[in-house]
């Protein structure tokens, strides 16, 4: 059962931008921290940015600070990932997930999240 629908991925040149959206298909997002994760080719899924339920706090993982921004609109049950100055190493499938309520959301690591969407492909290439 897919809880989210991710969209906004595509092919972009290095230095370009994309805005990803993650919309809840079934559940309401207002009570839970949400994270954006990516799975690069040949690697395990990793956290990029996570945002608290209120949106007041965010956690950045390595390599994205200053380039990626996360935001949320609880009224629309949607979380966004704005990606600027994209690099080829940002290529991968991007997923959003909901923080497990019995875990700490602010480590922003995949094992603390669940209810993944189907992902959206981001390819950064010239």
Image (cartoon, rainbow, N blue to C red):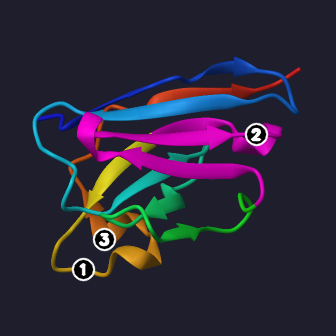
Q: How many C-alpha atoms fall within 10 Å of the one at disc 3: few (<14), some, or many (≥20)?
A: some
Circle nearer the N terminus (1, 3): 1
Q: Nearer the viewer, mark 1 or mark 2?
A: 2
Q: Residue at x 73, y 62 (%)?
A: 65
* Magenta stretch in the rendered image: 66-94
8 on left or right of 18: left
Q: Secondary structure at mark 1?
A: loop
Tell me, yes or no, whether the two marked residues, 1 and 2, touch with CB atoms within 8 Å.
no
Alpha carbons under labels 3 and 2: distance apart: 26 Å
Is 15 or 77 nearer to us in this picture? 77
Residue corresponding to mark 2: 84
Q: Position of residue 117 (x, y in %)?
A: 29, 37
Q: Is residue 89 magenta?
A: yes
Is 30 or 89 nearer to us in this picture? 30
Tell me, yes or no, whether the two marked residues, 1 and 3, touch with CB atoms within 8 Å.
yes
Tell me, yes or no, whether the two marked residues, 3 and 2, touch with CB atoms within 8 Å.
no
Label disc, if present, on residue 112 of the rendered structure: 3
Residue corresponding to mark 1: 103
Alpha carbons under labels 1 and 2: distance apart: 30 Å
Q: Secondary structure at mark 3?
A: helix
Alpha carbons under labels 1 and 3: distance apart: 6 Å
Q: Residue at x 83, y 40 (%)?
A: 85
Label disc, if present, on residue 126 of the rendered structure: none
- Classify residue 60 by image quadrant: bottom right
Q: Residue at x 77, y 44 (%)?
A: 89
Quadrant in which the N terminus is drawn: top left
Q: How many C-alpha atoms fall within 10 Å of the one at disc 1: few (<14), some, or many (≥20)?
A: few
């Amino acid at each position: 059962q897919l809880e989210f629908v991710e969209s906004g991925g595509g092919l972009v040149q290095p230095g370009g931008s994309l805005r990803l959206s993650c919309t809840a298909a079934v559940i309401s997002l207002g009570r839970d921290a949400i994270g954006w994760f990516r799975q690069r080719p040949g690697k395990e899924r990793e956290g990029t940015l996570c945002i608290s339920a209120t949106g007041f706090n965010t956690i950045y993982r390595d390599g994205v600070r200053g380039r990626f921004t996360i935001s949320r609109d609880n009224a629309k049950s949607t979380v966004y990932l704005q990606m600027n100055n994209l690099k080829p190493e940002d290529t991968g499938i991007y997923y959003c997930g909901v923080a497990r309520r019995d875990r700490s959301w602010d480590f922003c690591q995949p094992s603390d999240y669940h209810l993944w969407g189907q992902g959206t492909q981001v390819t950064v290439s010239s």
